[in-house]
């Protein structure tokens, strides 16, 4: 039995440096609530100051970045929303699930992420939170090892992995407190049976992770996962899993 083949991810034969730098700058601005100075962007991304300045001026001209000439600070601009509008307005399963996440996050007092399988990683493609003053924050575009946490138990459960592949993947996860491997394997079997992955404090201390697959059958390409503070009120995560399943089912509505 061989390990499940990862979904294809083709690297460009010759990456275009200016494009890579521009995307890095946009992601940098998106990670911060406040606008940034050129020096802050350069320091965080390690881009040549002259190159960064020229890219920012181009992005400003194209309406993707706003520049405050008084404070000399940059921020994302509304042109990005216009650029993404065709995706946002689509009525595909992923978009429908993303819309349903907002209400679920409020009801569960949780942060809910929609993750996409990319090779041997999971990439965050949409996030909804409860808006509380103290809440768990996710960063769009972040990638994590595919066997990490509640999501990882689902990936392991839905793949044709041999034992060596599972052991390697388990060892690569940056656990805060690694579970016992035998117990982890048992939890994978439970995830396969119930269609729900659960992690209690092994990824982040004091946090409960619950995940369900977006696709009920076939290859697992997307996972809907909730992260909550584990304050003892969620001894039975079944209601959380049921609410996440409703989010996933909204994709088929």
Image (cartoon, helix red, strand yellow):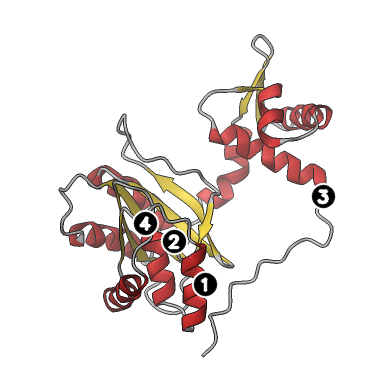
Q: What element carries label 4?
A: strand
Local SS, label 1: helix
Residue that sits furthest to the top in the current view: 70
- Identify the residue position indicated by label 1 in the image: 168
Q: Tell me which label, 4 or 3, sits earlier in the chain.
A: 3
Mark 4 highlights which residue? 225
User: Are discs 1 and 3 less than 8 Å apart at CB?
Assistant: no
Q: Name the residue under label 3.
A: 16
Classify residue 183 as left or right of residue 144.
Answer: left
State which quarter of the image contains the C terminus: bottom left
Mark sitting earlier along the chain (1/3): 3
C-alpha separation, residue under disc 1 versus residue under disc 3: 33 Å
Q: Report the side of 241 relative to 6 (left or right).
A: left
Are circles 4 and 3 on residues that touch, CB within 8 Å?
A: no
Q: 172 above or below 233?
A: below
Q: What x and y, as percent, mark residue 42?
A: 72, 29
Q: Is residue 129 visible?
A: yes
Q: Earlier in the sequence, mark 2 or mark 3?
A: 3
Residue denoted by label 2: 148
């Amino acid at each position: 039995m061989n390990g499940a083949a990862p979904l294809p991810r083709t690297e460009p034969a010759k990456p275009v440096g200016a494009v890579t730098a521009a995307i890095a700058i946009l992601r940098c601005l998106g990670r911060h609530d406040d606008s940034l100075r050129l020096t802050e962007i350069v320091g965080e991304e390690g881009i040549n100051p002259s190159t960064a300045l020229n890219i920012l001026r181009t992005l400003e001209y194209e309406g993707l970045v706003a520049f405050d000439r008084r404070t000399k600070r940059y921020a994302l601009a509304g042109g990005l929303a216009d650029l993404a509008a065709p995706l946002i307005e689509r009525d595909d399963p992923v978009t429908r699930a993303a819309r349903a996440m907002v209400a679920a996050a409020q009801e569960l007092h949780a942060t809910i992420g929609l993750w996409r399988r990319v090779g041997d990683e999971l990439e965050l493609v949409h996030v909804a939170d409860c808006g509380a003053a103290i809440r768990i924050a996710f960063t769009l575009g972040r990638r994590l090892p595919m066997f990490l946490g509640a999501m990882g138990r689902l990936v392991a459960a839905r793949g044709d992995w041999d034992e060596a592949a599972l052991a390697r993947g388990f060892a690569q996860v940056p656990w805060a407190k690694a579970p016992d491997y035998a117990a982890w394997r048992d939890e994978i079997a439970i995830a396969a049976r119930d269609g729900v992955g659960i992690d209690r404090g092994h990824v982040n201390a004091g946090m409960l992770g619950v995940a369900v697959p977006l696709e009920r059958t076939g290859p697992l390409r997307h996972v809907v996962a909730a992260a909550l503070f584990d304050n003892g009120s969620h001894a039975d995560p079944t209601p959380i899993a049921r609410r996440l399943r409703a989010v996933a089912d909204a994709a088929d509505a």
